[in-house]
Image (spheres, rainbow, N blue to C red):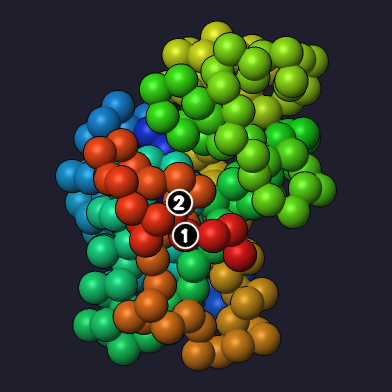
Amino acid sequence: MIIAIESASSDPSLALASPDGAAFAADGWAGEGRQASELLPRLLVLLARAGRDLRDATALAIGVGPGSFTGLRVSMSLAKGMALALRVPVVGIPSLAAWLEAEPRAAAAIARAGAQDAYLLRRGAKEPQIVAAAELAALVRGSLLAAPSELASAFGLVGTLPLHEAATAVARLAAARLRQDPAGDDLAGLEPWYLRAPRGVDSAEAVRRWP
């Protein structure tokens, strides 16, 4: 069983999937800033409803951003801690790519990159770009977007699609990775991917390049 966690936005999600990536249980919600405290309790409830146990896990899959600094750090710590304790591989999946995988109708995926900026990944693009909120609406006018509800409201976006199924896409993409590399990612080296240093952090070391 693959346990998948996606918490790069204010709308986190969880999924349980078979080794081939087919999800059989999922949960998604609007975190409203509380995703850090809700991830583990909701995961335990999801496991209980599916009649499964943490010890059934064969791999952990985690969305690695870019996106919420706190959400990514908490979910990464949770996934790595479980992978270490259960002695199973962990796989990091780019969050915006997973959002597009989850929503085939979306032309782009958008995550918050600060108070007045967003990460924008267009379908088919190799990597995201950082766009000012004032320019975003014009750039994506008329397009369906995979975006968290909080960002859509704050930036005045219309035509957005929710992210509640994002973790199921993380599980599918992780299963494909594991078929190619059963060992998954290096547990010690896996970190969230940031395209810019978080607010208050003035260090190039804090920025992870897009894979």
The quadrant the C terminus occupies is bottom right
| Contact flag, marks 1 and 2 (Cβ < 8 Å) | yes
The quadrant holding residue 9 is top left
For label 1, the residue is: 208
In the rendering, at what x and y percent does residue 202 appear?
Answer: 31, 46
User: Which callout, 1 or 2, points at the residue further toward the start of the chain?
Assistant: 2
Q: Is residue 137 visible?
A: yes
Q: What's under tag 1, amino acid-wise?
A: Arg
Q: What's under tag 2, amino acid-wise?
A: Tyr
Residue at left offset 37%, top offset 61% = 205
Query: What secondary structure is marked by label 2?
Result: loop
Q: Label 1 vs label 2: CA separation?
A: 5 Å
100 relative to 44, above or below: above
Residue at left offset 45%, top offset 51% = 194
53 relative to 140, above or below: below
Residue 194's label in the rendered image is 2
Residue at left offset 63%, top offset 77% = 177
149 relative to 201, above or below: above
Query: What secondary structure is marked by label 1?
Result: loop
Left or right? Give the position of 47 relative to 209. left
